[in-house]
Image (spheres, grey):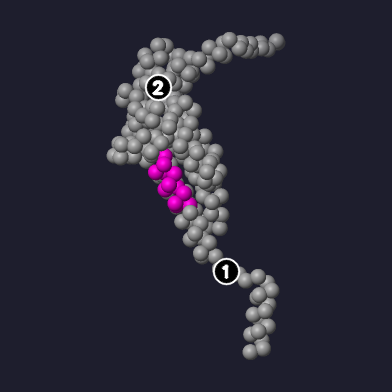
Amino acid sequence: MKVPTRYHSPLRQAQAAATRAQILQACAAVMQRGADLTFSAVAAAAGVQERTVYRHFPTKADLEAGLWAWIIVNVSHADFNAQSEDGLVASMRASFTGFDTAAPLIQAMLHSGQGLEIRRRQQPARRAMFEACVTAAVPRAPVELRTRAAAALQVLYSAPAWELLRSFWGMDAVQAADVIDLAIRALLAGLRASTDHEQPERAPPGQQAGRTEESGHS
């Protein structure tokens, strides 16, 4: 029996990608106005049938994951790939700028159950990034201390921190990023100073031998 082959049409694939992007933009619009992220609401906002939304996102978890991925690329510009102090600060600044350009959407995400679940799914990648940055900055620090420092970095580089500085201090993205930049560098500098201080000073081998010989003649 001849097995039918699948025909991959570039035009059809482009149309599917455009529809998917249209659906995700509709998700963002639904979230920005504070409505529940339901398939019917998204379909209405996107101007497509509800079954079209299901075809691209079979479950609500798929829809939420797709929205968060869209926000990362199109709003927050975070890639979770920073491996150093400077890389982390640069990523934070890009994210805060994106937060300001879509503030209602980010705030809606922060204050919704869907937004919380979406952020939780990204936590393993975020935690790995913060831990890598701390390890690069203070490799000799104890593991437990590095873990606490990584958690502190996440508190600093976060949408809630951006929102607090925006809402309570009236800061724009640049001003808020300057504050977090200062805090990140101060935290890591303090850890480096503390770790270096706790390391015992070792004299060069020649000096150690000299002291031993002197002690033997006394």
N-terminal of the pair, mark 2 or mark 1, is 2
Residue at x 56%, y 11% (from the top left corner): 12
Give SS at disc 1. Answer: loop
Of the 4 image quadrants, the one containing the C terminus is bottom right
Q: Position of residue 67 (x, y in %)?
A: 44, 26
Question: Mark 2 against mark 1, which lies toward the viewer?
Answer: 1
Asked if residue 180 lies in the magenta stretch, the reply is yes
* Residue 150 screen position, x and y as percent: 47, 48
* Quadrant position of the N terminus in the picture: top right
Bin the neighbour count of mark 2 within 10 Å (Cα to Cα): few under 14, some 14-19, many 20 and up.
many
Identify residue for label 1.
Answer: 201
- The Cα atoms of the two marked residues, 2 and 1, are separated by 58 Å
- How far across and down, in percent of the image, does residue 141 sit? 52, 58
Q: Which sits in the foreground, 113 or 197? A: 197
Q: Amino acid at mark 2?
A: Cys
Say whether residue 207 is magenta. Answer: no
Left or right: 167, with 175 as reference point: left
For badge 1, the amino acid type reads Glu
Of helix, strand and loop, which one carries label 2?
A: helix
Using the image as rendered, state which of residue 125 and residue 140 is in the foreground.
140
Q: Is residue 128 above or below residue 39?
A: below
x 53%, y 41%: residue: 87
Percent of width and height locating residue 169? 30, 40
Q: Determine the main secondary structure of the stretch shown in magenta.
A: helix
Horizontally, is 107 left or right of 90 in the view?
Answer: left
Q: Residue at x 36, y 29 (%)?
A: 103
| Image vertical order of residue 75 relative to residue 213, above or below | above
Q: Place residue 38 in its image quadrant.
A: top left
Task: Return the residue at label 2.
Answer: 27
Which residue is pictured at 37% across the width and 14% down the height?
Answer: 44
- Give the class, few, some or many, for how many residues have Cα within 10 Å of label 1's Cα (few <14, many ≥20): few
The stretch in magenta equals: 177-188
